Image (cartoon, helix red, strand yellow):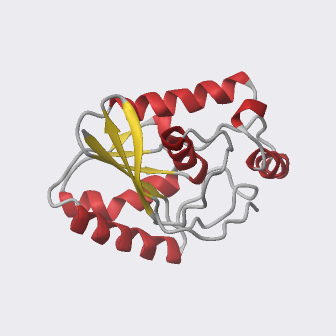
Amino acid sequence: MATIYMVRHGRAAAGFGAHRDPGLDDVGREQSIKAARELARMVPQAVPVFTSPLARTRETATPLVAMWEVEPTVEERIAEIPSPTTDLKERAAWLRAVMRGKWTDLEPSLLEWRQAMVAWALAQETNAVAFSHFIAINVLVGAATNAEDLITFAPDNGSITRLDNAGGALKLVELGQQAQTRVN
């Protein structure tokens, strides 16, 4: 059995509808340090570290990878939900609408993205830490709990959600800290 520690990135310097790939703001950098300390307490020795390719997740991983002296693996399958538009205002409106729905309401490409993420988690044979995103973490929690709602909980920035890959099935161990999240 492998435990997967899914970490939501720290607070970004800009919202989903304001910047394509923002880094962290000062609060987000503090959240990343706090998450690294908590992970080091939870996981006594270094394990593989994965990060989405986006700046906010890579920056959130920085304190932990420095502490453990490891190189993170950039993993496309744990990236942010793919948007059908590059226009930032349209993108934010699209995301607000999508977040209210169910997976069965979405187009096939998003279902493929979801399945690729679940396949990544099920392929983990050892404990791992992954720095990812709000909806991406919801994908795995939903798979573990058989939920069809796109959003099953609201992981806070810097929160750590634990899942087990137990015999080829995801099991929710513990939800990370929750918070009110607003798409802007």
Q: Is residue 126 left or right of residue 99?
A: left
Foreground pick, 132 / 107: 107
- x, y (%) of residue 116? 51, 27
Q: Whole-percent x and y of residue 1?
A: 24, 38
- Vertical side of 163 occupied by 9: above or below: below
The residue at the point 52 percent across, 66 percent down is 157
Q: Which quadrant, please, contains the C terminus?
A: bottom right
Residue 45 image point, x, y percent: 14, 56
With respect to residue 86, does 37 lie above or below? below
Query: On the image, which quarter does residue 107 sit in?
Result: top right
* Residue drawn at point x = 76 percent, y = 48 percent: 95
Is 114 drawn above or below residue 142 in the view shown?
above
Residue 35 is drawn in which quadrant?
bottom left
Left or right position of 119 against 114: left
Q: Toward the viewer: 132 or 87?
A: 132
Q: Residue at x 72, y 65 (%)?
A: 182
Point out the residue furthest to the front here.
Answer: 146
Q: Residue 158 in the image: state x and y as whole percent.
A: 46, 66
In front: 148, or 65? Answer: 148
Count the marks: 0
Image check: 177 left or right of 49?
right
